[in-house]
Amino acid sequence: MNSQIIEVFNVTSGAAWLPWAVQYFFLIGLSYGSFMLTLPYFVFGRAQHERQGRLALLGALVCGLTAPVALLADLHGPGRFYYFYLYFQPQSWMSWGSFFIPVYLGGLMLYAWLALRGGPARRPALAAAALLTLAGAVLVALYTGMEVMVVQARPLWNTPFLPLQFAATAFVGAVGLLLLFNRLIGRHDRQLEISLSRLLVLALAAVLTLGGSWLFVSLSGLSPSHSAALNQVAGLPRWQLTAVWAVLASILPMALAIWRPASSGLMTGLIAVHSAWMMRWTILIGGQDIPKTGAGLYDYQLPLGSDGLLGIVGTFGLWIALLILMIDYLPWAGPAFDSVASRKTQPASALPDSAMAEH
């Protein structure tokens, strides 16, 4: 009788989630985070938040409409999306997401249409649309976190802190986006920059608290899966550098926002948006670098084609194109969007004397 010994060292595989997935998680997070920032003005009627509300609605729309394109690209074929509806799997968070996304985006577009048309007669309908969109936003935030968290084979993902951190960093990115919009679209509102800077400090404090809580649970041994996740990455220089970056990307904009809340918005906004994107890149792409069995890391190299750098640039290009179209063709008119560019489109007779002198 012959016997054989088969020794398996490791099995390598390519990344299942590509940069398209990072783009989707990033953009949909910015969208629902921005939507939350529209509520004080459009739903609760606080006039002092008009510019914030209008800029946030613009951010929610442009990010929300770009995100599904990245998601469809990650499925490697738009036609595959309908399989979620033909073969619904109730145990799959991804299947549930195929229903949550239309609820959110449909509610968002209805909400935006009612908000931009204005008028007291539409207030009840606007409130109902806001409630529908809010429910969709919560469901999208829940499913995008849970579909990663449920992967038990990856301890780094399998933690209840992950959905909370996704939501917290999404809000940080949304505040950062509004800080950038406030500087780049229409007039620069210093009071809004101060208000957003204070909000950014609170959001970053939440991110640091969640990160510190995860580290405490991992070091304390209270959860074997959290300890296993920390042990997988603690001794690796790449992940040590990532940890330093994550802390600096939170502390630096927080310090700037506290020190110079009225003039640091451009820098803090860029860092906040960047940190929201990099958090998702680190978790989704970096997490797949860690083998499910064995030691060390897989060596992921960003492709230059549509599944890599070109896809990232293309998504950003689509985002820019939609942003320009929305600014030009949607009725954003009002004190919140008053700018030299908009005044130059008026007839010379309609301009004040100082503006006519400029012409």
Image: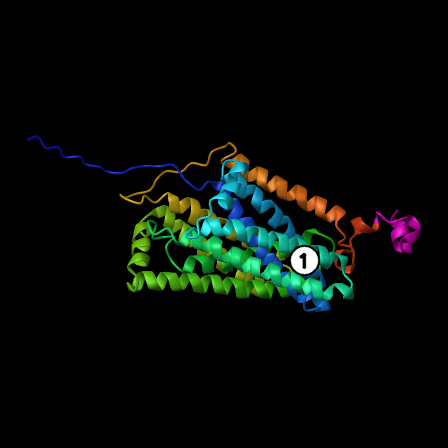
Is residue 176 shown left or right of residue 125? left
* Element assignment for label 1: helix
Q: Name the residue rendered at 65%, 51% in the picture.
A: 61
Q: Residue furthest right?
A: 349
Is residue 105 shown left or right of residue 337? left
Where is residue 317 drawn, in percent x and y? 62, 39
Is residue 23 on the magenta stretch?
Answer: no
Q: Residues within 10 Å of mark 1 (few under 14, many from 20)?
A: many
Asked where in the image residue 115 lies, by quadrant, the reply is bottom right
**What kind of residue is marked 1?**
Tyr
Q: Nearer the viewer, residue 203 or 140?
A: 140
Asked where in the image residue 49 lies, by quadrant, the reply is bottom right
Q: Name the residue rendered at 83%, 51% in the picture.
A: 343
Question: Disc 1 marks which residue?
Answer: 111
- Picture layout, residue 312 above or below residue 104: above
- Picture layout, residue 119 above or below residue 79: below
Q: Residue furthest top?
A: 2
Q: Nearer the viewer, residue 36 or 172?
A: 36
Name the image quarter holding the N terminus.
top left
Give the magenta part as a residue range.
Answer: 344-359
Q: Specify how the rendered protein is coloured.
A: rainbow
Question: Can residue 267 be seen?
Answer: no
